[in-house]
Image (cartoon, rainbow, N blue to C red):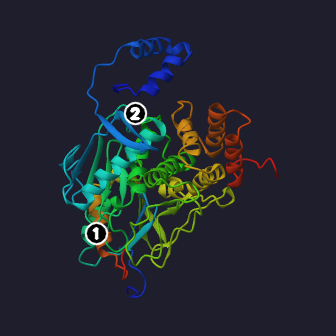
């Protein structure tokens, strides 16, 4: 019998941290997919090139990104990316997480 | 000098090398430097001013500004909407960027005799209305890019001359040989942009060092934000203290240096330390800060001897060398610069 209160091994949380920019402000979004969005998120997570090295974006004051996938207390994926790398599946994943993360009253 | 694909500072360095492995490259660089560059049209202008009872007429180079509009997409460069000599468009961000680039250009020319980002009259390229609610302004290696802000925290990045000059300053640093955008060299890169940002504002307002706010980005926060600017060079760590943004994390002394892996190793955080060193030197010397402290920092950047990986101590030593070259070893300028770096814990305090 599954324990209703224990997290399912299939459940995961995605954390997106954006730092840098001219203001140097860090902002974090943390979200768990709704059950109906979970397959889409899982597909996105698996399609992201997690082993790719961070490449520095040219210029200055660009955002820097840290993206992590956690199952329970364990980070199963972690990547650090330059702003120019946030495209394709990374961009889709970041957009999903930012959209799903509940905004604070003055969401910034 | 008309710019070629290889920047002049690199040719200079190559030409001067005595490494036998680079003998052929050095000879080629010397030959290239000796060649007359192809003619390239540069813009000039006549400026009139009044000094005492005399009308002074001056001819000099003029900026070549090109502002584009990304129409709230992230596609660069966007549609060209205002070029040099065009009338104002009525779009606030377009006209603020145009005016701010002109004021920054004037500052670099009047203070240091520098003709734009590449020191050769190249176009100043900017894109406004970048992205959707985009809370940032950046230099992408070719152009300055400004978001409109989300309206809740930021209300547009072109409203602040120090922000515009900060971005143009990144171009100047890159064209001068660059400082790697990571850790201490990255914080120096950031600090130089803040120095140029503050000085452009002071130059525009004809403010002396003791009259200036030394704030970076005043006027870009929405009214609800508890804060006056992004950073304070005078008092790092005091620019904002807001329930959502948190407190300004900048240190103003080496004992509070922040170790972090985010923000390229805290380049926008630890820049508070060299920022305050510049403020201390400028206010100790008094008068217009661009005339002595600013000139020393500018010479340090453009001498061609600053390593792209310089840390705070190497940069401090380079500012002392630049001050000694410009004003002499025993000058008050050298003493002020030494005391400034001691004041932020980068140099040992000789008096302690």
**Who's the residue at 28% across and 21% down the image?**
B39
Mark 2 residue crowding within 10 angstroms, few (<14) / some (14–19) / many (20+): some
Q: Chain of mark 1?
A: A
Q: In the figure, residue B163 lies in which quadrant?
A: bottom left
Q: Identify residue for label 1.
A: A96
Residue A58 can be seen in this image: no
Nearest to the observer: residue B352 or residue B109? B109
Q: Identify residue for label 2.
A: B119
**From what the image shows, is residue A34 above or below residue B14?**
below
Q: Residue furthest right?
A: B352
Q: In the figure, residue B171 lies in which quadrant?
A: top left
**Who's the residue at 30% across and 53% down the image?**
B97
**Residue A106 on image: x %, y %:** 37, 79
**Who's the residue at 48% across and 15% down the image?**
B26
Distance from disc 2 to disc 1, alpha carbons, whole Å, reads 44 Å
Q: Chain of mark 2?
A: B
Residue A14 can be seen in this image: yes
**Residue B333 on image: x %, y %:** 67, 42
**Who's the residue at 41% across and 50% down the image?**
B165
**From what the image shows, is residue B62 above or below residue B288?**
above
Of the two numbered discs 2 and 1 in the rendering, the one whose residue sits closer to the viewer: 2
**From what the image shows, is residue B194 above or below residue B231?**
above
**Secondary structure type for disc 2:** loop
Quadrant placement of the N terminus of chain B = top left
Q: Do discs 2 and 1 share a chain?
A: no
Nearest to the observer: residue B267 or residue B53? B53
Mark 1 residue crowding within 10 angstroms, few (<14) / some (14–19) / many (20+): some
């Amino acid at each position: 019998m599954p324990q209703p209160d224990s997290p399912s091994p299939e459940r995961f949380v995605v954390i997106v941290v954006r730092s840098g920019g001219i203001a140097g402000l860090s902002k974090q979004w943390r979200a768990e997919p709704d059950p109906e969005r979970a397959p889409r998120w899982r597909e996105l997570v698996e399609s992201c090139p997690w082993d790719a090295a961070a490449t520095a974006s040219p210029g200055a004051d660009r955002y820097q990104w840290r993206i992590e996938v956690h199952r329970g207390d364990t980070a199963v994926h972690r990547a650090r990316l330059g702003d120019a790398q946030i495209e394709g599946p990374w961009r889709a994943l970041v957009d999903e997480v930012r959209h799903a993360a509940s905004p604070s009253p003055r969401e910034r | 000098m008309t710019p070629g694909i290889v920047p002049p500072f690199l040719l200079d360095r190559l030409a001067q090398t005595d490494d036998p492995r680079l003998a052929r490259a050095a000879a080629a660089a010397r030959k290239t430097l000796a060649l007359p560059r192809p003619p390239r049209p540069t813009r000039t202008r006549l400026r009139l001013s009044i000094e005492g009872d005399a009308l002074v007429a001056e001819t000099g180079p003029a900026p070549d500004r090109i502002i584009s509009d990304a129409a709230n997409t992230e596609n660069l460069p966007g549609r060209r909407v205002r070029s040099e000599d065009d009338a104002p468009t009525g779009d606030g961000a377009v006209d603020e960027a145009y005016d701010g680039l002109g004021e920054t250009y004037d500052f670099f020319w009047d203070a240091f005799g520098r003709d734009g980002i590449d020191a050769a009259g190249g176009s100043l390229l900017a894109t406004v209305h970048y992205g959707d609610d985009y809370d940032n302004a950046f230099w992408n290696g070719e152009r300055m890019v400004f978001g409109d802000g989300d309206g809740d925290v930021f209300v547009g990045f072109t409203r602040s001359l120090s922000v515009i000059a900060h971005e143009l300053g990144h171009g100047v640093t890159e064209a001068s040989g660059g400082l790697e955008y990571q850790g201490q060299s990255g914080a120096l890169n950031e600090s130089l942009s803040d120095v140029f940002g503050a000085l452009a504002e002071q130059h525009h307002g004809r403010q002396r060092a003791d009259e200036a706010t030394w704030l970076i980005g005043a006027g870009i926060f929405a009214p609800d934000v508890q804060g006056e600017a992004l950073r304070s060079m005078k008092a790092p760590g005091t620019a904002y203290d807001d329930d959502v943004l948190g407190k300004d994390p900048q240190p103003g002394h080496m004992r509070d240096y922040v170790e972090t892996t985010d923000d390229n190793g805290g380049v926008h955080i630890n820049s508070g330390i060299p920022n305050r060193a510049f403020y201390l030197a400028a206010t100790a010397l008094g008068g217009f800060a661009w005339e002595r402290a600013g000139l020393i920092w500018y010479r340090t950047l453009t001498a061609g001897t600053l390593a792209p990986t310089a840390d705070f101590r190497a940069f401090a030593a380079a500012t002392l060398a630049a001050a000694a070259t410009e004003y002499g070893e025993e000058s008050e300028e050298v003493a002020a610069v030494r005391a400034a770096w001691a004041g932020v814990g980068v140099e040992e305090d000789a008096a302690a």
